[in-house]
Structure formats: structure tokens, C-alpha cells
Image (tube, rainbow, N blue to C red):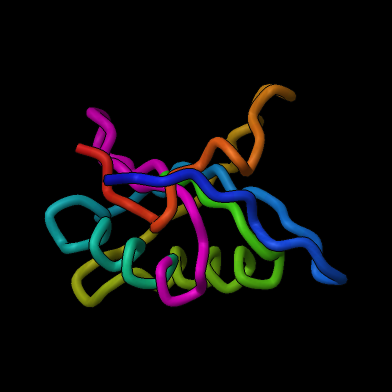
Amino acid sequence: MTTRVTPPDGHDAAGTLHAIVAGRVQGVGFRWFVRSEARRLGLAGWVRNLDDGTVEVRASGIRTHLVALRGALYRGPEGANVSGITDVDDPPASTPAEMPYPFMILR
């Protein structure tokens, strides 16, 4: 069961990360790695494989935690080789409250 969450308010503002990760990122446990890191950081959102061999990540939460997740995306799990991360511009209607919590893998 997935619940919805609004990231906490405070001096460290909430934000979102929506990115496409390219490289050797499928078949190496990348989605499970992202899920684990995002949950450890208390982020809401999801990760999924795309048909073109990339991985899409959408997360929301405290901005410093999103920066930490982005760093983890560049590292990836053992066996991964990230060649780049492309940011995705979201429409204005997209809000952090729409994100599933806890962070999940979409299939």
C-alpha cells in the first residue's frame, strides 16, 4: 500500500528531483540501489527502467537529501557505469505531495 506525503517544512526547504540516468544502469541492481538510498534519506518518490535502457528517478524531500541522492545516482551500485544524468523539467502542476511514500520501484 502506498501513501502520499508532503515533505516536512523547515529551514531546509523541500524540493523535487526528476532525472534520467544513462549508462550501464539496467541489470545491475540500480533501481534497488536508488530505492535503498532514497529510503535511507527519507525521500518520497519512485524509480523505474525505461525502454531505451535508461532509468528514470523522481524524488521529493529536503533539498540537502536530494543533493545526496543525486550524488548516489552518479556512483550507482557495483557493476553500474553512469555516463550521465539529465534533469527533466516538470510541469507546474507537479507537486511533492503527489509522490508516493515510502520511495518505491515502479515496474
- Of residues 73 and 46, the one drawn nearer to the viewer in this rendering: 46
- Of residues 22 and 95, the one drawn nearer to the viewer in this rendering: 95
- Of residues 77 and 34, the one drawn nearer to the viewer in this rendering: 34
Tell me what residue is drawn at x 26 percent, y 54 percent.
Answer: 25
Question: Compared to 97, does 104 lie above or below?
Answer: below
**Can residue 48 be found in the magenta stretch?**
yes
Q: Which span of residues is magenta-colored?
A: 39-56
- Residue 72, percent from left and from top: 46, 71
Tell me what residue is drawn at x 49 percent, y 54 percent.
Answer: 44
What quarter of the picture does the C terminus occupy? top left
Q: Residue furthest right?
A: 11
- Residue 51, percent from left and from top: 23, 28
- Residue 99, percent from left and from top: 51, 42
Is 52 displayed left or right of 63 in the figure?
left
Tell me what residue is drawn at x 61 percent, y 41 percent.
Answer: 97
Question: Compared to 34, does 58 lie above or below?
Answer: above
Question: Compared to 47, does 75 lie above or below?
Answer: below
Question: Compared to 87, does 75 lie above or below?
Answer: below
- Residue 28, percent from left and from top: 16, 62
Tell me what residue is drawn at x 64 percent, y 67 percent.
Answer: 67
Is 91 displayed left or right of 29 in the figure?
right
Q: Residue furthest left?
A: 27
Is 67 displayed left or right of 106 in the figure?
right
